[in-house]
Image (cartoon, rainbow, N blue to C red):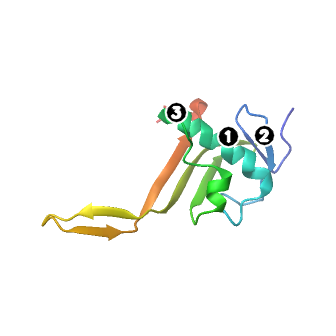
Amino acid sequence: AMARANEATAVGLGLPAPLPPGTSCWTGQSLDAAFHGMVDEMGARSAQAQGIKNPFTSASKLVESDHRLHVVCDDDGTHVLGFIKVGTKHLYYYAKNGAMSEMDPLCVLDFYVHESCQRRG
């Protein structure tokens, strides 16, 4: 079935979800329930591509955090092509003098590019 205008479908997954016009970034608070399946599926694909058992990205984890999910769709907005998840992460590090410090920088926490869009330069 063809996706209607203003719907995003994870490529080849058949997971329709309404795509609000101009929307490209979601937080846990703005994530529409209809997108949960798409976020979970893309997170699972990211985990599979990285060879890890449990995904770093899921709708439930996004809802419980202050992370942001940026999604890329095709030109007509009918297929999700990838995502990048960013947010702060509490890190410990050692300075050159050996002293341990802490910081909370903005980090890339996860990303995924659909296989059909990889290696295109």
Q: Secondary structure at mark 3?
A: helix
Is tag 1's residue or tag 3's residue first in the polypeptide sequence?
1
Q: Which residue is mark 2?
A: 15
The quadrant where residue 62 appears: bottom right
Q: Residues within 10 Å of mark 1 (few under 14, many from 20)?
A: some
CA separation in Å, label 1 and label 3: 12 Å
Q: Residues within 10 Å of mark 3 (few under 14, many from 20)?
A: few
Between disc 1 and disc 2, the foreground one is: 1
Q: Residue at x 18, y 68 (%)?
A: 99
Mark 1: amino acid: Glu
Is tag 1's residue or tag 2's residue first in the polypeptide sequence?
2
Mark 2: amino acid: Leu
Q: Residue at x 54, y 51 (%)?
A: 84
Q: Which residue is mark 1?
A: 41
Left or right: where does residue 116 sit relative to residue 121? right
The correct choice, above or below, for 117 with respect to 87 in the image is above
The furthest residue to the left: 97
User: x%, y% of residue 29?
Assistant: 69, 66
Which label belongs to residue 49? 3
Mark 3: amino acid: Ala
Q: Secondary structure at mark 2?
A: loop
